[in-house]
Image (tube, coloured by chain):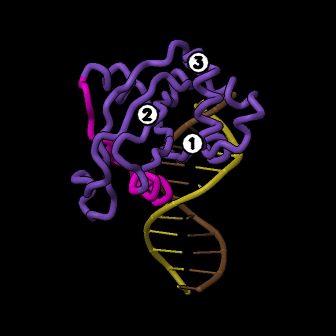
Chain colours: A purple, B yellow, C brown
DNA sequence: GCCAACGTTGGC
DNA sequence: GCCAACGTTGGC
């Protein structure tokens, strides 16, 4: 079975990568965008996820993994959206900032750069490798 | 704080 | 079913 790679955004003052490390795992709910929800549904157990801090930090700071695939998001009264569960893997040795990512030609096609408001987006194997290299991790 | 991008809502 | 108005996200 092949694993895929993803990127999720979170405002660190709402929920940071440090919070995920402290908690050990978390329910990734509250996504209210159809494109993002499709990506959540495509996640498989063990898929690895870049954790990006939006608003403050503006950088990929760590790696998480999917430990529970999509299930109904209890915080959605209409019952249309889904959540997954994530656990921390490791913090990056060095955060990779948005400006570095924008300056890297290998990342020009990255979904999160092309559509800045998308809170859950796919990451190709090449993009994944590039970002880890930029993080020295 | 401002504004661009983009999704959603509601009048017609 | 179209499209203008409005709300939200997120970078600057």
On residue A66, the disc is none
Give the residue at mark 1: A123
Residue at point 71%, 44% (across, down): A109
Of A35 and A43, which appears nearest the observer?
Answer: A43
Q: Quadrant of the C terminus of chain A?
A: top right
Vertical order, A11 against B10 (above or below): above
Give the structural element (helix, strand or loop) at label 2. strand
Q: Mark 2 or mark 1: name the one nearer the start of the chain.
A: 2
Left or right of A8? Residue A98 is right
Query: Quick one: label 3 or label 1, which is nearer the N terminus?
Result: 1
- Residue farthest to the front, as pictured: A1
Indicate the chain on which mark 2 is placed.
Answer: A
Residue ID at (24%, 51%): A75
- Numbered disc 1: what chain? A
- Among the 4 quarters of the image, the one containing residue A134: top right
Q: Residue A103: x percent and y percent?
A: 75, 27
Q: Residue at x 54, y 46 (%)?
A: A122
Q: Which mark is residue A10?
A: 2
- Residue pointed to by mark 3: A135
C7 with respect to A79 (left or right): right
* A111 sits left or right of A82 in the view: right
The crowd level at tag 2 (other Cα within 10 Å; few <14, some 14-19, many 20+) is some
Q: Find the magenta span and give its range.
A: A23-41
């Amino acid at each position: 079975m092949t694993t895929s790679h993803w990127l999720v955004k979170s405002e660190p003052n709402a929920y940071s990568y440090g919070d995920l490390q402290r908690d050990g795992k978390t329910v990734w709910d509250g996504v209210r965008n159809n494109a993002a929800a499709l990506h959540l549904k495509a996640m498989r157990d063990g898929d690895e996820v870049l954790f990006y801090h939006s608003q403050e930090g503006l950088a990929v700071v760590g790696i998480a993994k999917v430990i529970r695939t999509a299930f109904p998001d209890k915080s959605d009264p209409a019952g249309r959206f889904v959540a997954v569960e994530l656990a921390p893997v490791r913090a990056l040795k060095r955060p990779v900032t948005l400006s570095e990512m924008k300056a890297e030609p290998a990342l020009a096609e990255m979904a999160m750069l092309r559509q800045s408001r998308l809170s859950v987006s796919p990451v190709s194997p090449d993009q994944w490798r590039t970002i880890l290299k930029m993080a020295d991790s």
